[in-house]
Amino acid sequence: MNDFSVHRIIGRGVFGEVYGCRKADTGKMYAMKCLDKKRIKMKQGETLALNERIMLSLVSTGQDCPFIVCMTYAFHTPDKLCFILDLMNGGDLHYHLSQHGVFTDKEMRFYAAEIILGLEHMHNRSVVYRDLKPANILLDEHGHVRISDLGLACDFSKKKPHASVGTHGYMAPEVLQKGTAYDSSADWFSLGCMLFKLLRGHSPFRQHKTKDKHEIDRMTLTMDVELPESFSAELKSLLDGLLQRDVAKRLGCLGTGAVEVKGHPFFAGIDWQQIYLLKYPPPLIPPRGEVNAADAFDIGSFDEEDTKGIKLLESDQELYKNFPLVISERWQQEVAETVHDAVNLDTDKLEARKRAKKLLGQEEDYAHGKDCIMHGYMLKLGNPFLTQWQRRYFYLFPNRLEWRGEGDSRQNLLTMEQMQAVEETQVKDKKCVLLRIKGGKQFVLQCESEPEFVQWRKELLVTFQEAQRLLRRGPKMLNKSRSSSEELSKATLTQRSSNGL
């Protein structure tokens, strides 16, 4: 637990809470799902909790899937089971459906395509999800979706499941028929139910908005879904194929799984590789800075009284001895994204210092043998819209102030004729030189040390005053003739000696 700094709570489930967290050593943000061991024991949920850990490891190992909320770490404390998961901060599709209203065919096609690739990833690993519904589809900050919460998922590689689990209104007929074995077929039926809800606002088996679970199950087992006339022929064909009660006739169960779903005419023109690379623009981008959850301010907390009489024994802790896990590929990716970048940043800074040192010699060469009064690094605030201080190399000549950036051969110039005043000012408790320019503009300079500030302020003020005196003596000649600029330089140098840094 000490490897993470935990932030605010972002959700709550049957066995625990979900928090936003940051990995201390790399700074990467994750979601931390914490399950309470006492609550698990009270509800006899040990098998479910351990199953979720197994399912997450199955879908998170190997090639990463951008459409499933995957796990990077799992660990436990004396009181908690902790999953470290991908952070999704855009809310779920159920919430956005309630805010946005029903989706168009085109908008639904986008979500369907990304979800299909998530299901394909699971099915290729012999995992049936069993709980596909809008509330379990989370959005990231850009609007792309991921399937979340694998607590009810099941591995069917060795033995097909036959338990009746899921959410009423989305469960396939074979799941409802107790004792009937099934596999990934159940997810394709659930997909049809979910897509119908995105288009119409309710499950196809809750047309009368009944909340009676038995009635919903009865309709799922017996009712032929009537599709609205407003649906296109391709859309009707897709939903009709997915909502077939007979598994042998259902789209996705005819022998090639996700391939036959992706090949349906409804998805004609979709480039599935581009979908996988997240190149298609999402139809809805979650508002930034918002929690995007209906119960965001009503998450509450568990009543500790519920588990007051529950004691964790040594045998309970023994159940979780193999719980800790690190998904090595995802850990490597985290390092590549964060630590590697940090190392590169340090290397870049070192190279920049080397270049600056080399440039310093070039800068001194530029000033050498000329009428340069003073030269060296200062920080400048270019205009009122810039808040970042820019480090530049400056040269003070009798008739101008020149500067350029590191590695920049372009010279910038401010003549003494353009200046109206040289003053001292303060920016965030730091003494600065303020140059007032004709036209109401200003130029702020900050030195890297107090002695440098004193010297630059003095030399700029004296140079400016002497230049103004000469300009008053012969302004017309100085404005029109280049030779007058040279005369100004020579005249000034006769009164003071050059002194570079």
Image (cartoon, rainbow, N blue to C red):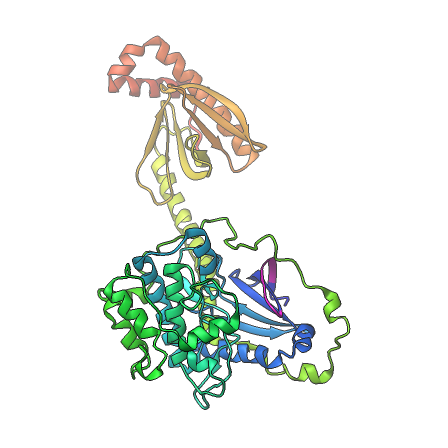
The residue drawn where x is 59% and y is 66% is: 13
Instruction: Residue 237 in the image: state x and y as whole percent.
Output: 27, 70
Instruction: Residue 376 in the image: state x and y as whole percent.
Output: 44, 36
Q: Nearer the viewer, residue 477 or 317?
A: 317
Q: Residue 430 vs residue 275: left or right?
A: right
Residue 60 at least partly seen = no
Instruction: Residue 227 in the image: state x and y as whole percent.
Output: 32, 65
The answer to whether residue 86 is above or below residue 433 is below
The residue drawn where x is 47% and y is 74% is: 217
Q: Residue 139 vs residue 233: left or right?
A: right
Does the magenta stretch mainly form a helix, a strand or a loop?
A: strand
The residue drawn where x is 43% and y is 82% is: 174
Per the rendered image, the range of residues in magenta is 5-15
Task: Specify whether residue 390 is painted magenta.
Answer: no
Q: Which of 307 and 420 is in front in this view?
A: 307
Q: Quadrant of residue 262?
A: bottom left
Q: Residue 373 vs residue 22: left or right?
A: left
Figure quadrant of the N terminus: bottom right
Instruction: Residue 330 in the image: state x and y as whole percent.
Output: 46, 71
Q: Quadrant of residue 83?
A: bottom right
